[in-house]
Image (tube, rainbow, N blue to C red):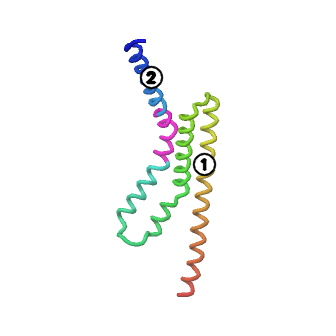
Amino acid sequence: MNLYTIALFFHVSGAIGYFVGIGTWLFILVLMFPSGAALIEPRRRAIARLAQEEPDGPLPQALERRTHDPILLTALQTVAALLLGIVFLMTNKPALIGSLIVMAVALVLGLISGVLVSRATRTREQGVSTQVDPMRKQAG
């Protein structure tokens, strides 16, 4: 073993790591770009615009509704689950079929958890609004 073979080993290992990184990056672009561009980004911009337009003080109801948008919550939960699926793939390196199963499970779990979080948020908001409404009627 000489210095050249050691340098060649690190060179090939670096090239493999580079291609794995580029492949992962492209996979994330293909998988997550549509949800980010179509579902998350327009809603995030609307929240930012509304927040900048409002004065300091209590959170206006329109802005609060935007922050609890069920589609936004579901999309964010799904992207987070997909990212965890990718981390699982990176650490366990299953075969192709296993990888596809992992990502399908991550997608389903993300969608289910997003729907559950959205439903819980909506139920909590409805409970608060029904508690507040009778007080307004009594005061009026």
> From which residue to which does the magenta span run?
25-38
From what the image shows, is residue 8 above or below residue 98? above
Residue drawn at x 59%, y 69% is: 126
Could you tell me the amino acid type at mark 2?
Answer: Ser
Q: Residue at x 53, y 87 (%)?
A: 139
Residue 13 vs residue 100, the one in the foreground: 13
Q: Position of residue 1 (x, y in %)?
A: 43, 12
Q: Is the residue marked by circle 1 packed among few (<14), some (14-19), or many (20+) residues within 10 Å?
A: many
Q: Which residue is mark 1?
A: 111
**What secondary structure is found at the residue carrying circle 1?**
helix
Residue ID for mark 2:
13
Side of 48 where 71 appears, left or right? right
Relative to the observer, which residue lies in front, 133 or 84?
Answer: 84
* 14 vs 58: above or below: above
Q: For this view, does 102 lie left or right of residue 32?
A: right
Which type of secondary structure does the marked residue at label 2 adopt? helix
Q: Which mark is residue 88?
A: none
Q: Is residue 95 above or below residue 113?
A: above
Amino acid on which the number 1 mark rests in the picture: Leu
Residue occupying the far bottom of the picture:
139
Magenta stretch contains residue 35:
yes
Please, is residue 65 above or below residue 3 in the view? Answer: below
